[in-house]
Image (cartoon, helix red, strand yellow):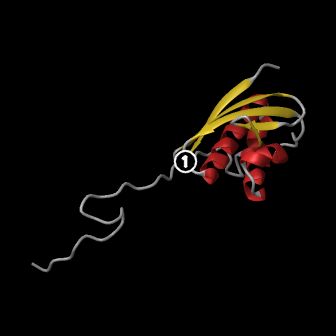
Amino acid sequence: MEVIHKIGRRKTAVARVYLKEGSGKVTINKKDLNDYFPTATLQYKVNQPFALTDNEEKFDVNVNVYGGGITGQAEAVRLAISRAMCELDQENRAILKPEGLLTRDPRMVERKKFGQKKARKKFQFSKR
């Protein structure tokens, strides 16, 4: 099996995932998964596609991720891994799609408007 390369995005985070057969080692930006994502919630998000498709400990994953915050990066990695699992076996698509793991979350931060403190502050009301 050759290396499968997929890209996942969330907010401003971009993750490039390289998936190959191995022992289940996940490396993110040359660090171990547990070192890069210290909380159990973020580790669960990254491992979710493997758990749902019963592929834990079967693939080595090498990830390059940049931009955004730690949660956005974890969800970008999850999307990229989900896409790779679908390329590996089409039956995985039927498992991952209902869980929402193949949908790119389009929500982004709204830009700040000039003359205002924030993006969504109301404009000054004037009766005249």
Q: Is residue 128 above or below residue 55?
A: below
Nearest to the observer: residue 92 or residue 3? 3
Query: Which x, y percent locates residue 109?
Result: 45, 55
Q: Amino acid at mark 1?
A: Gly
Residue 128 occupies quadrant: bottom left
Q: Is residue 4 above or below residue 35?
A: above
Residue at the spot 28% in from the left edge and 65% down from the top edge: 116
Specify few, some or many for label 1: CA neighbours under 10 Å numbering under 14, 14-19, or 20 or more.
some
Residue at the spot 78% in from the left edge and 53% down from the top edge: 44
Nearest to the observer: residue 55 or residue 116? 116
Q: In the image as oriented, which residue stretches furthest toward the bottom?
A: 127
Q: In the image as oriented, which residue stretches furthest toward the top?
A: 2
Q: Is residue 118 left or right of residue 40?
A: left
Residue at the spot 36% in from the left edge and 66% down from the top edge: 120
- Quarter holding the N terminus is top right
Does any portion of residue 95 appear in the rendered image? no
Residue 42 occupies quadrant: bottom right
Query: Which x, y percent locates residue 13?
Result: 56, 43
Q: In the image as oriented, which residue stretches furthest toward the left?
A: 128
On the image, numbered disc 1 is attached to which residue? 68
Residue at the spot 88% in from the left edge and 41% down from the top edge: 56
Q: Is residue 71 left or right of residue 109?
A: right
Query: Which x, y percent locates residue 75?
Result: 65, 48
Query: Which x, y percent locates residue 55?
Result: 87, 39
Does any portion of residue 24 appear in the rendered image? yes
Nearest to the observer: residue 15 or residue 67? 67
